Image (cartoon, rainbow, N blue to C red):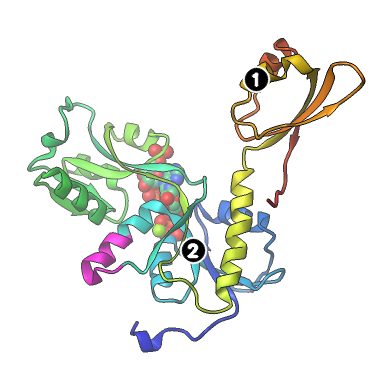
Amino acid sequence: MSPSALPAARDRLRVAIQKSGRLSEPARALLASCGLSWRESRDRLFCYGETLPVDLLLVRDDDIPGLIADGVCDLGIVGRNVLAEQILQRANGSGQDKYREWRALGFGGCRLDIAVPEGWSWGGPAQLQGKRIATSYPSLLQAWLREQNIGAQVVPLSGSVEIAPRLGQADAICDLVSSGATLAANQLKPVLTLLQSEAVLAGPVAPFADARAELAALLLRRLDGVLRLKHSKLLLFQAQRQTVPALMKLLPDAEPPTVLQVDGADTVALQALCHGAMTWQRLEDLKSAGASGLMVLPVERMLA
Ligand SMILES: Nc1ncnc2c1ncn2[C@@H]1O[C@H](COP(=O)(O)OP(=O)(O)OP(=O)(O)O)[C@@H](O)[C@H]1O
Ligand SMILES: O=P(O)(O)OC[C@H]1O[C@H](OP(=O)(O)OP(=O)(O)O)[C@H](O)[C@@H]1O
Ligand SMILES: [Mg+2]
């Protein structure tokens, strides 16, 4: 799109998410937990924001970076794997990035791995010299091969990459791995990780120059609050004052606690916001160190 065709100033924010697939439900749930709600359209492609002027566009995940680059959408939720691949592809053409990762969102985790037939004894990246590698991420793979100074042939495929070695199309593959079940089913083993991926919020490199700037800042503030509290719990307990330092050593992930005197004696009540997982084992360790009346409460929202 030429600069003159850029969309006019807008006072609503448009966020693209995957229409259907692995990221669609968690992306929607995350935005809803930021206080957004939408009126459903009949075609389920565009949802009008009701609580805030933030609309949703439901699309194929691969289209999200391009929609942001063209200014059709302001923000998008997409896998880092897709974003990184398209940033490289576009950089080849223009040398300029128009969008970037704004926040990692903590779901949709997977890796972009190189995998080889189980029968290979793996001796390191140099073993890929002169080999054919099938992938849906040709730019990321090409960039890595260049960096490693390995001459290998990249075989681009849009899907079912794991079957390529069995079909004789390639010697190795470079594809997304989560549980590893698909690799195992195809007698392949992972040997290298090129990228650790998760869903990310993508947005333009240049700041918004109209009302969208404030809306994006509001959304980011809420997102940060939600992401920060994802695993956080409020821990309540009682203890003897002299045991508090030892107990706090067991809570390195806690914010400085609020300490309240319970009676005239030495007993105090503590409340501490803990950011790590509050497992049974941790509660039992606290009890052994002198804590009593332990209670773990969920934290829904926080505004610093
Ligand atoms: N096995 C996996 N485990 C976890 N996350 C994954 C896995 N495979 C892919 N992902 C992540 O989820 C994203 C979306 O995957 P999905 O399979 O839904 O995409 P798709 O088939 O390309 O969908 P679309 O129809 O929107 O193009 C991927 O880009 C990646 O970030
Ligand atoms: O390590 P695993 O847990 O087995 O997951 C890895 C598989 O998941 C994805 O495929 P998907 O299931 O989305 O199929 P598709 O790529 O054909 O759409 C990815 O492309 C791998 O093939
Ligand atoms: Mg896709």
Classify residue 262 by image quadrant: top right
Residue drawn where x is 66% and y is 70% of the image? 40
- For ligand 3, the image quadrant comes to bottom left
Under mark 2, the amino acid is Gly
Magenta stretch encompasses residue 91:
yes
Residue 32 at least partly seen: yes
Against 117, residue 164 (above or below) is below
For the residue pair 53 and 205, the one nearer the viewer reads as 205
Tag in front: 2 or 1: 1
Q: Is residue 219 left or right of residue 206?
A: right
Residue drawn where x is 34% and y is 56% of the image? 84
Residue at numbered disc 2: 76
Q: For mark 1, give the secondary structure.
A: helix
Sooner in the amino-acid sequence: mark 2 or mark 1 = 2
Residue at numbered disc 1: 282
| Farthest-out residue, right | 264
> How far, Cα to Cα, is label 2 from label 1?
38 Å
> Where does the magenta region start and end?
86-96
Q: Position of residue 164 (x, y in %)?
A: 23, 45
Under mark 1, the amino acid is Arg
Q: Position of residue 270 (x, y in %)?
A: 78, 27
For the residue pair 106 and 190, the one nearer the viewer reads as 106
Residue drawn where x is 49% and y is 71% of the image? 74
The answer to whether the residues at label 2 and label 1 have Cβ atoms under 8 Å apart is: no
